[in-house]
Image: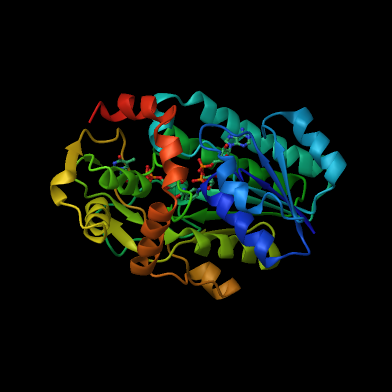
């Protein structure tokens, strides 16, 4: 089978390309990535020479470029990871989120409609459900929870989901959608909480915690997300949405303190900064459906996953130091000042 993976030079798409090329030598992974600030060929370096891997530099919103790839490669499956993915950037500059996340998804769907496809899978997020109150630990997002977005990022991802569902119904396309909780693991871009605090702590820099650090996220080790998507594209029912999450809720402060303890660094590095506008309070996924229908359960407990993640950042300093010393330094100064 030929499987298009968009956004494969990013965090989760990159881990997915590694996972799929290793697990299925008989399949070919065709990675399409625009190489934005978040795309990194170093993430793909370990698999670039594999016979079952091919890379195309292209924008998913560029219709001609995408149609050309479909015409030449005749893919069987598309997994659409490509997106602008950072909530804070969407608050400063929403437009590119609409172009990539909505128009880009529509171009990918049109290509599938035009050339035919066995399965289109949209990688979505729990953020489309909005947030849950902090004082109701009994509430979880199910696949029936109404869409209720907070940020331009989540609004663009929800729009993409609606397009996928419209194409599935109107054109009878075999589409699935997954909505996953916060991922962490190797190759995570350092603008996001966990890699940011690992990098800052290692450099004895302040750790910016928004508000009081009480917001809750439901963390999942990235490989467990990859396994879930692989199961959905092979065994999931077309037309269905699957929530993915591991019942691993932590406040941001708990996460930061865990990382500091692992690195033997002082909690004095924690600095409370102005809260994110519209900051979602709590995300919590109910993964009953994917467990019951596809037998998926997360394999990596947080204690183990965070140790593996920290070890990866220690062993791969060059990967993230190249990022934080480049254009990212300007972004960091604008976001956090010269801390
Ligand atoms: P990322 O920002 O690390 O990577 C995104 C990748 O997409 C980059 O390689 C980038 O170059 C590429 N890209 C961006 N615009 C493109 C375009 N127009 N055409 C082609 N490629 C383009 O993101 P991530 O954290 O790996 O997230 C991947 C997907 O998973 C996204 O769709 C995101 O919404 C979703 N998701 C992420 C999380 C999370 O915790 N990170 C959780 C749930 C869902
Ligand atoms: O410097 C920071 N300080 C801080 O307190 C940053 C970058 C984040 N935070 C907080 C905000 C969130 O409550 O940490 C939490 C996690 O923040 P992010 O890593 O930016 O992730 P989040 O906003 O939860 O979104 C992530 O999960 C859902 C991904 O980036 C999305 O792409 C995904 O859809």
Position in image of residue 125 (x %, y %): 49, 49
Position in image of residue 331 (x %, y %): 38, 27
- Determine the residue positioned at 27% across, 62% down: 137
- Res. 252 in view: yes
Residue situated in front as seen by the camera: 4 or 325: 325
- Residue 70 appears in which quarter of the rendering? top right
Residue situated in front as seen by the camera: 35 or 246: 35
Q: Which quarter of the image is occupied by the N terminus? A: bottom right
Position in image of residue 184 (x %, y %): 42, 55
Q: Which quarter of the image is occupied by the C terminus? A: top left
Q: Is residue 227 above or below residue 320?
A: below
- Determine the residue positioned at 86% across, 40% down: 71
Q: Quadrant of ligand 1?
A: top right
Residue situated in front as seen by the camera: 221 or 47: 47
- Left of 78 or right of it: where is 143? left
Q: Is residue 254 above or below residue 268?
A: below
Position in image of residue 97 (x %, y %): 52, 31
- Res. 284 in view: no
Number of on-image labels: 0
**What color scheme is it?**
rainbow
Q: Is residue 193 above or below residue 295?
A: above
- Left of 298 or right of it: where is 123? right
- Determine the residue positioned at 78% across, 28% down: 64
Q: Residue furthest left?
A: 268
Q: Is residue 150 above or below residue 230?
A: above
- Left of 55 or right of it: where is 262? left
């Amino acid at each position: 089978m030929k499987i298009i993976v968009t956004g494969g030079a990013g965090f989760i798409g990159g881990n997915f390309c590694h996972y799929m090329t290793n697990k299925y030598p008989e399949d070919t992974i065709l990675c399409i990535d625009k190489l934005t600030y978040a795309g990194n060929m170093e993430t793909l370096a370990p698999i670039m020479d594999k016979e079952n891997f091919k890379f195309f530099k292209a924008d998913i919103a560029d219709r001609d470029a995408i149609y050309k790839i479909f015409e030449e490669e005749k893919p069987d499956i598309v997994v659409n990871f490509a997106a602008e993915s950072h909530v804070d950037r969407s608050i400063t500059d929403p437009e590119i989120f609409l172009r990539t996340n909505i128009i880009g998804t529509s171009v990918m769907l049109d290509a599938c409609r035009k050339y035919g496809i066995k399965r289109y899978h949209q990688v979505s997020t729990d953020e489309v459900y909005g947030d849950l109150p902090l004082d109701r630990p009994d509430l979880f997002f199910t696949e029936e929870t109404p869409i209720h977005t907070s940020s331009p990022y989540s609004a663009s991802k929800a729009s993409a989901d609606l397009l996928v569902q419209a194409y599935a119904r109107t054109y009878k396309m075999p589409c699935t959608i997954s909505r996953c909780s916060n991922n962490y693991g190797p190759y995570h871009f350092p603008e996001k909480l966990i890699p940011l605090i690992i990098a800052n702590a290692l450099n004895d820099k302040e750790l910016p915690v928004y508000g009081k650090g009480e917001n809750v996220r439901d963390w999942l080790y990235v490989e467990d997300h990859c396994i879930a998507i692989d199961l959905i594209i092979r065994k999931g029912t077309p037309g269905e949405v699957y929530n993915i999450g591991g019942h691993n809720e932590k406040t941001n402060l708990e996460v930061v303190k865990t990382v500091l303890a692992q690195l033997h660094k002082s909690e004095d590095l924690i600095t409370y900064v102005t809260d994110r506008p519209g900051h979602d309070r709590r995300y919590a996924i109910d993964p009953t459906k994917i467990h019951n229908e596809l037998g998926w359960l997360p394999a990596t407990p947080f204690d183990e996953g965070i140790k593996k993640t920290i070890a990866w950042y220690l062993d791969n300093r060059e990967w993230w130091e190249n990022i934080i010393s480049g254009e990212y330094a300007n972004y960091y100064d604008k976001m956090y000042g010269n801390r």
